[in-house]
Amino acid sequence: MNVVEEVLNQLSAIVWGPVMLAFLLGVGVFLTIGLKAFPWIQTPAAFIKLWRSRESKQEGDITPFQALMTALSATIGTGNIAGVATAIALGGPGAVFWMWMTALFGMATKYAEAVLAVKYREIDEQGRHVGGPMYYIKNGLGKRWQWLAVVFAALGTLASFGIGNMVQANSVADAVESMFKIPVWQTGLLMTVLTAAVILGGISRIAEVAAKLVPTMAILYISGALFVIITQIEQVPDALLLIVQSAFTETAAVGGFTGAAVWAAIRFGVARGVFSNEAGLGSAPIAHAAAKTKDPVQQGMIAMLGTFIDTLIVCTMTALVIVLTGAWSSGETGAALSTLAFNVGIPGWGGYIVVFGLVVFAFTTILGWSYYGERCAEFLFGIKVIWPYRLLWLCAIPVGATGKLGIIWLMADVMNGLMAIPNLIALGLLSPVLFKVTREFLKSKV
């Protein structure tokens, strides 16, 4: 078992190494330039479109607003709490700056994914709108690229059980046991029942639940973070300066923090940023393909807000609390670091905000990823796989909640990274289509 774990560790280091991180960031930069900074310029307009999209009578399965909430349900999770803390613990405060850079250029990547997902989506045998990287590879690049679509779908199906299910269930069960002393098997059982009540109703029910849970929990979590930030508002300029300076200079050892080179800040900032917002991995466009819309660009604009909200807002809130409270130099890491920071900022209550946020965010991630994995499995095996997949998904939750997931985590990490390769290749090859569609949209608005 140790040999397998060592091999997976080495694979993970390669998959999430300099080449992959440069590829992810490079595609984002390329698309941002090709789109002439369209995502940045159109961000205010995108928020207006999001608000107006809560109702839609166009062709599709869920409203554009629900599509974004479903995508956010899968992305806002442990990465926003434990992931940010891990990035800071390993790369220093400068890692936060590189998370911001990943998000800024990731907005173009997420925009491109959703535009292509809507443009090349299909209607399956049950009359549902299905799409995502496997479909825009198949329909946009032609039959000779079919193998690449199959590779993505296979990786997406397998990765969903790790990163989107068992790892999340384990995080919830562990947090609940630590805070409330509730046995992990009880938490696993409750999560299974709650998940069944949602996913057995398909995308419509998942979207309805996500549209209520995600905004509510995000507002509560951000409010808690803002309370800490406002109480230490005079230190915010120094905290921001520390983040920017540490992004370009080595962070010295302080307290329990062992110090970090600039490369560590870049590596962990980019890696945790991608893990958090999933820009480039190809997961979110699977949800956006189900939106009730005829305009790929409009859905792309709404989709890119997912990266903005996830990393530039939620992750930044977590990061500022960790830096402002001085917890970043404690030597703690992961969820324990975030819990310490909130407890320092809000004595007696801060830890509950983190645990409650972790539980709800991880639960919604299980819901969102169930849909991603199901669509990938359907692409491979047809609609006959849907119910067996859902039952297998439910069985995996208690296994994840009660198990030791070292190897599962590593396997999920590797497959999650490998998912990005076929997707990024497709985004590059289909970029002329993307640029053309965007130009036509801008001309129609003149």
Image: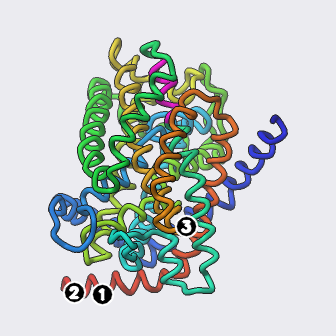
Residue 233 visible at all? no
Q: Label 3 crowding class (10 Å Cα cut-off): few <14, some 14-19, many 20+?
A: few
Residue at screen point 25% across, 87% down: 443
Q: Say which mark, if any, is on residue 440.
A: 1
Q: Are marks 3 and 1 in contact (CB under 8 Å)?
A: no
Mark 3 or 1: the one toward you: 3
Q: Of label 3 and label 2, which has the lower sequence position? A: 3
Residue at numbered disc 3: 381
Cα separation between marks 3 and 2: 40 Å
**How many numbered discs, if any?**
3
How many residues crowd around disc 1 within 10 Å: few (fewer than 14), some, or many (20 or more)? few
Contact? badges 1 and 2 (CB < 8 Å):
yes
Q: Which residues are the magenta region? A: 169-178
Q: Which mark is residue 444?
A: 2
Amino acid on which the number 1 mark rests in the picture: Glu
Badge 2 density bin: few <14, some 14–19, many ≥20, Cα 10 Å: few
Q: Circle 3 sits in a helix, a strand or a loop, which is it?
A: helix
Question: Quarter of the image containing the C terminus?
Answer: bottom left
Q: Nearer the viewer, mark 3 or mark 2?
A: 3
